[in-house]
Amino acid sequence: MEIRRPVGTPVRRQVLGLDGLRGLAALYVVLFHCWLYTFPGYPDSSAPGWLDVLMFGRIAVVFFLVLSGFSLAISPARHGWRSGGIGEFLRRRAWRILPPYWAALAISLVVSLYVVPASHYGPPDGSSLLVYGLVLQDMFFAPTPNGAFWSIGVEAELYLLFPLILLVRRRFSAAAVVACVTLPVVLFGLLATDANPVEGDNWLAPHLAPVFVAGVVGAGIVVASERVRRLPWGWFAVAAAAPVLALGFLKGNVWTVHHYFWVDLAIAPSMAMLLAAVAGGRPAPLVRLLITRPLQALGNFSYSLYLIHLPVVLVVVRRVAPHFVAPGMSTFCFTLAVGLPVSVLGAWLFAEIFEMPFKRNRSWKSLTGALGRSGPRTQSRPSTTVPEEQNQPPVPEATPSRGNSPSAPVT
């Protein structure tokens, strides 16, 4: 299966398979948090070893950022690496991201204050409302109402950087933009104690910028020649990931978590190559899976799933499960049976109210007109024509940083 475009036919605005990848990645994030909050001791978790496959939430962060850069850059790549204006780009991003985020923030504040705390730092306060309301959580600390929200702050900073990334890519080359963003990060890492920087809960955007850029550069595949598009990008992705995965397997999970600074940078190229392969319609079995209706639908509201799943998981693990099951594996299974479907169904309903109206309409005039014609009720179906700049993935909560308590999630 390959995506071919006969001469004279319109350019497809949406790359097939990306929504499906978002859906799978968001589902993994929910499973990760079910695992993280059930079994104490992270990263040396008390969970059975066969569940270790669920512990790599930080890798999911990297994948989402690569996918974010890739999705954002598709349209500029097709237009000479131009975004259509910085102001308009930022307006579209704010319109798409902020309304559901603010709604989820309000819900999270209520849950964190009155049902179950979201952080070992204590309940949210006035500074939380200010910092998180202005999406400044990567720059300033405040008790969090939702531990997953840190990455929204990172994304916001990367959006501000995106026009500059496009400028360097347009004026110079892909290699130039990779070098400008990556070399300072590598130098910082090498100069740190034991060449392994200790990360905190803030100022993560500079370190994660190179993985975002990997996605931006990878989006060039959509305008590459047929010869380049036909290269075995899927096998290239496997070859690039193999050394990283082998090292992690040999060193163990704890070592991997403590060296995420370097693991992030090392694994990002393979992720960009995977996206290039999917953009070219290969491998065919994977693409056919990704474009199935269930995964398309899940990907369509994956941002909402990311925003609201964590309060649901916390309530189930800490307030509901203790009344019915014992700690450990019984709680994990209970959380999967209750928390997972409630998170998915709740996210779908949340998306219908707070996300889809802003996804389907580009302005207040369009939105109020649509509401006036049909009322607040909208149909739920997978999006097939949404421009790439509106197809941004959520970013899952990172795994706990080494600056926190070993059993405390990053907040």
Image (cartoon, helix red, strand yellow):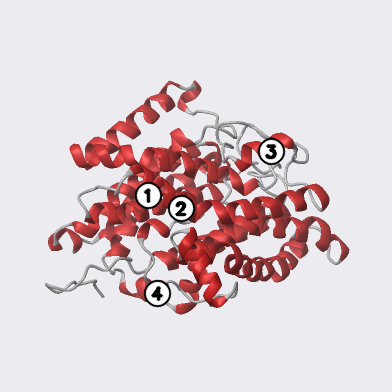
| Left or right of 405 in this view: 372 | left
User: What's the mark number on residue 64?
Assistant: 2
Q: CA distance from mark 3 to mark 2?
A: 25 Å
Is residue 301 shown to the viewer in this render? Answer: no
The residue carrying pointer 2 sits among few (fewer than 14), some (14 to 19) or many (20 or more) residues within 10 Å by Cα, namely: many
Crowding at dot 4, Cα within 10 Å, few <14 / some 14-19 / many 20+, comes out as some
Q: Amino acid at mark 4?
A: Ile
Please report whichever mark, 3 or 4, sits nearer to the chain's N-terminal start.
Answer: 3
Instruction: Name the mark nearer the viewer: 1 or 2.
Output: 1
Quadrant of the frame with the N terminus: bottom left
Position of 172 compared to 375: left or right? left
Q: Secondary structure at mark 3?
A: helix
Question: Where is mark 3, residue-wise?
Answer: 128
- Residue nearest the viewer, comparing 146 with 329: 146
Q: Residue at x 66, y 52 (%)?
A: 36
Q: How far from the left and from the top, in percent, is residue 242?
A: 37, 52
Q: Pointer 1: what residue?
A: 69
* Res 19 → quadrant: bottom left
Q: Tag 2's secondary structure?
A: helix
Label 3 CA crowd tier, 10 Å (few <14, some 14–19, many 20+): many
Q: Earlier in the sequence, mark 1 or mark 3?
A: 1
Q: Are marks 4 and 1 in contact (CB under 8 Å)?
A: no
Q: Considering the image in quadrants, where does the C terminus appear? A: top right
Tags 4 and 2 touching, CB below 8 Å: no
Q: Nearer the viewer, residue 106 or 177?
A: 106
| Three-letter residue code for mark 2 | Phe
